[in-house]
Amino acid sequence: MKRRIEINKKKFEYELQRRRGTRCVRLAIYSDGNFVVSAPRWYPLYVIRKFLEDKSEWIWEKLGKINFEAVRAVRQEEDSRYKAGKKSAKELIQSKLEFFNQHYNFSYNRVSVKNQKTCWGSASRKGNLNFNYKIANLPEELQDYITVHELCHLKELNHSRNFWKLVEETVPAYRELRKKLKNYSKQPNYSN
């Protein structure tokens, strides 16, 4: 949930994440200027605001070190790359889904291509499939693995033994590909 805070007469937006297992309020400031406050679900909002007020000097100091012009330029570049890559990624994913679904014959609803920061794909209970547009930059074997992985989540919304058996039907080398994908995920031009 997005919230606003004023520090030294400047307004900043932060994300408030209510977490079940959290016992205290935590604050993280990222290099792009975004910051996230994690708090227990039961914490009242005024306690969180007080926490931020108490930390306002520290927040101001950290935000002061960020070059927002550079952040804006990077975001614009990322946005133009996303727009250019989204269409080709969607066509690629659609063709791979059609190909692999000839084997599985699962039904799905919407297929979306997004600029995801932390994952290559996801599947919802409603049968929607989401993919990171950067999938088009990966080797074909990894594109296949991600497509099959998300497709199999339509049947098994977990990573159980049954799920991996489904994946293995069309991607027998999924274990090696999974490891290979983790290496790509650490490279800044791919998943971040």
Image: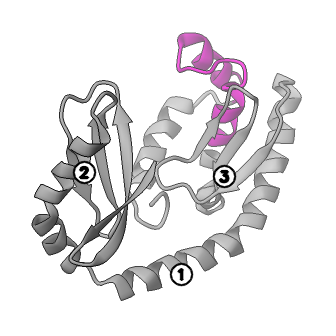
Please name the residue that numbered disc 3 is placed on.
140
Q: Residue at x 44, y 82 (%)?
A: 72
Give the colour scheme of this rendering.
one colour
| Residue 161 in magenta stretch | yes
**Which numbered dot is residue 49?**
2
Q: Residue at x 20, y 77 (%)?
A: 8
**Relative depth, front residue between 83 and 19:** 19
Pair 2/3: label in front: 2
**Main secondary structure found in the magenta portion:** helix
Please state which amino acid type lies under the numbered disc 3: Glu
**Mark 1 Cα-neighbour bin, 10 Å: few <14, some 14–19, many ≥20:** few
Q: Which residues are magenta?
A: 145-170
**Mark 2 Cα-neighbour bin, 10 Å: few <14, some 14–19, many ≥20:** few
Position of residue 188 relative to residue 178, above or below, is: below
- Of pointers 2 and 3, the one earlier in the residue sequence: 2
Please name the residue that numbered disc 1 is placed on.
76
Give the x, y percent position of residue 116. Answer: 55, 55
Structural distance between the alpha carbons of marks 2 and 1: 32 Å
Please state which amino acid type lies under the numbered disc 1: Gln
Give the x, y percent position of residue 51. Answer: 17, 49
| Residue 50 in magenta stretch | no
Q: Secondary structure at mark 2?
A: helix
Q: Describe residue 180's horizontal placement relative to residue 22 as left or right.
A: right
Pair 2/1: label in front: 2
